[in-house]
Image (spheres, coloured by chain):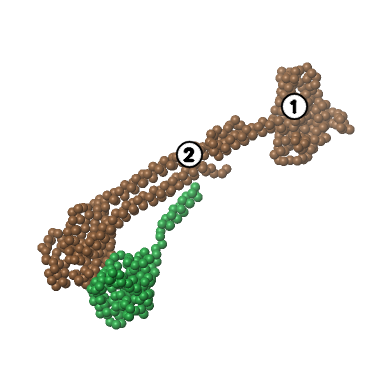
Amino acid sequence: MKKIILITVISSLFLFLSGCKNKETARLIVPDNYTNWTITADNLNYPIPGHENHFRRVFINSTGKKVMTEKKNGRVFYNYPKGTIIIKEIYPSLNPKPETKPISLSVMIKDPDNPKSRDGWVWIVKDLKKNTEKIIDYEFCYDCHTNANEPHPYGDGNPNGDFRDDVFFPYKKGN
Amino acid sequence: MKHFKPITRRVNTIIILSLVFGLGMTTAYFSYNENSALISTTRNNLHQQSDILYQSIKNAMLPGNAPIAVSLFTDIRDINPAYEIMLFRENGVQAFSDNTTIDTVNTNLMRKKFSERLTQINDMFTIHNDPQFTSTVLQRKTSAFQISDKGQTFFTIYKPLLNLPKCAVCHGSDHTIRGIIKIRSNITPIVKKQRINLLIAGAFFILLLLFLTLLLTRFFKTKILGPVKHIGTVCTEVTSGNFNSRVTINNEDEIGVLGDTVNTMVEGLYERFQLSKFVSSSTINSIKNKEEGFKDSITLFFSDIRSFTAYSENKTPEQIVENLNKILSMQTEIIHKYGGDVDKYVGDEVVALFTGEEKEINACRSALEIQKELAARSASHYDGLQVGIGLNTGEVILGMIGSSQRADFTVIGDHVNFASRLCDAAKPGQVIISDSVYTNLHNRFKTSNPYKIKVKGKEKFQRVYILTPLTKEDPEV
């Protein structure tokens, strides 16, 4: 009888424990050496929704510089290769001093196979004070950046309505 | 004796535990999945509706058709009063409830794009101290939650309406959230259905548990435990000597086969028990102990019917057998009574063995009681037959004597022959004992003076005694 009860208790415990899933530990994926990359925008000192009154600077990695462009029906289509990383530094104010460090990074990583990607990009916000990264898999980043594929009020404004693959400041050869 | 643990209790415990866990987990799994699917479908539908609404509002507002969005909200509320849809500014004030947005747009466009409308204070609705609303504004992320109030359950979604670049032309770039869409649906019927599902699953579980418990318990009781108990009872009865007890199981399975085997075994035991009557105890013990042959000091008992040949000539075979069996049975019974073992019957002769510390005394008691019985009832019960008895003690060889096909465990040796000679010498009603027997009686029996007799196989005269029949005053009576 004792054996039966023991087996029952052990089985219950096993079933209970097997129901507990291991929480995935956070893994930092944004590279630290991005400041050596190519800058695609460095004078973003005007407020915009999403970043409000924060100066911004944009970098692109070497993979991103291999962006393919194709013209279809008079419209240019940009296609950033998988592995492209675009990092936007967010500063504490619109007019930071030269020695001021950014407070956070908004990051786009081209990875269409990632289940958390939206429109082919994985959207990440890195808090540089806490050194934590958070994947934004809801509308917030993606919904705004789709506006880059039509005329918009930033940078050159994309007057021809090119499909710019959600990038407001695209890398252009010769930058 | 080992502590008895009834298997019935263990079997019942196993059955009930198996059913409780098996059925319980299955029922819980399916009812949980059913309810999860129900609620997740409802929530997904509401999320999809909020997405559609989000896109509708966005597309309606971009060309400057905010009034269309307002009427959309009103129309949806009118169609389904249980479905509440509202748009709030990020400060919690209901959108379109005053002219704030119109003024901002007109200012940003530097023209009077929209005419101011009359503010209807009664229409204004403001959200205060709603942590979910505040969280949505701060996190800029859709939040959904379920609350119950006064027996009603509501599922609410707060979805941020972003100030997209194309919105910024009219609304300015100094803020991220244009507003918060609130969708609230009364899901009380869904929650009730969940509860009913759980109740049905619980009832189904209990009924099935009871039914299967009864079914399995009855099955085990009637098909396994009952027959096993019955077989145990039969074995107990057979152990007590009741060889008429039989297993009566009609199962055509392993238990039935076991019952048949037990019955066959009981029949075999009964046959052996019956056969044991025809075999001496020493033979049985010898077989049991796998004895080959050994020497032992025993008292040999020989009795023989006097003038039996002459008696036989005047009687029919039926009379001879009947009376012979009577007198042999009487002798055997008395010999057994005093612990003797009948070694064999040789015609009208009885050969018996006595062992143990009082072997001589027991042999003498048997002999005297036999003679006493015959003296009293020979004429009336034994057709006038009389016996002579000879007793001798000595070391003899005991062993299986015979061939591999037929053998008897018997005694051989000089002392055996001497006992036989004493029997031959005894007259009807006499018990002649050898000197070796006499020595160990320690005067507990009366004897006549020692006699000297010459027997075949012995060169010298042998001293013998004749036992005096017991009287009422005799201590051995």
Q: Residue at x 57, y 43 (%)?
A: B1
Residues tagged by mark 1 and mark 2 found on one chain of the structure: yes
Q: Can see residue A1?
A: yes
Chain at numbered mark 1: B
Q: Colour of chain B?
A: brown
> Which of the two discs, 1 and 2, labels the residue nearer the N terminus?
2
SS state under label 1: helix
Residue A84's place in the image compared with B254, above or below, is: below
Residue denoted by label 2? B219
Q: Which amino acid type is shown beneath numbered disc 1?
A: Leu
Q: Nearer the viewer, residue A60 or B323?
A: A60
Q: Residue at x 71, y 26 (%)?
A: B329
Q: Which image quarter is the C terminus of chain B in?
A: top right
Residue B18's place in the image compared with A109, above or below, is: above
Q: Is residue B261 left or right of residue B43?
A: right
Chain in green colour = A
